[in-house]
Amino acid sequence: MNGDGTLTSIVAERVDGHRNRLDCAAVFCFIGADPVSGWLSGLAVDDDGFVLTDNRLPAGSSGGALSFQTSTTRVFAIGDLRSGSAKRVATAVGEGAGGVSSVHAALAGE
């Protein structure tokens, strides 16, 4: 990364050792594509550990009636942790906003 106080360029190195200088003003770093769901015992997850919600839940699950609801009633999952999500910040923000409606509906049903 190059710049004096602000980013102006990066140097990308290829597998063959060739380097390219690329002008840029920002860098977005995506780290980790693995879910950190081990602490969530009892929730249905897919083969990769992402939490299953609504229409991805196995038949007969007690949860799932509301959007973003997991296999456990009144437990919701959004964003990168959710199986089938787009794994992007804007998507997680939108899912969070949508999940609020489900939480309200769950609380109103008490």
Image (cartoon, rainbow, N blue to C red):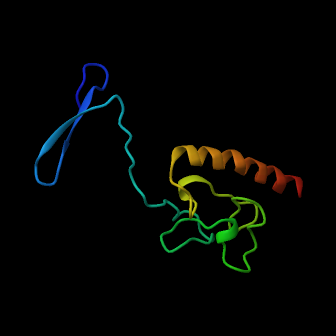
In the depicted structure, whether residue 28 falls above or below residue 16: above
The quadrant in which residue 109 appears is: bottom right
In x, y percent, where is residue 33? Answer: 42, 58
Looking at the picture, tell me which residue is in the foreground, 69 or 75: 69
Side of 61 relative to 5 (left or right): right
Q: Nearer the viewer, residue 88 or 18?
A: 18
Residue at left offset 71%, top offset 51%: 99
Q: Position of residue 85 (x, y in %)?
A: 56, 58
In the displayed structure, 72 sits above or below 1; it is: below
Q: Work out which residue is located at the far left of the displayed protein and give it.
A: 17
What is the quadrant of the C terminus in the image? Answer: bottom right
Residue drawn at x 38%, y 40% is 28
Q: Horizontal placement of 54 versus 45: left or right?
A: right
Q: Classify 48 as above or below 67.
A: below
Residue 77 percent location from the top left of the image = 64, 57
Q: Position of residue 41 (x, y in %)?
A: 59, 68
Q: Is residue 65 left or right of residue 92?
A: right
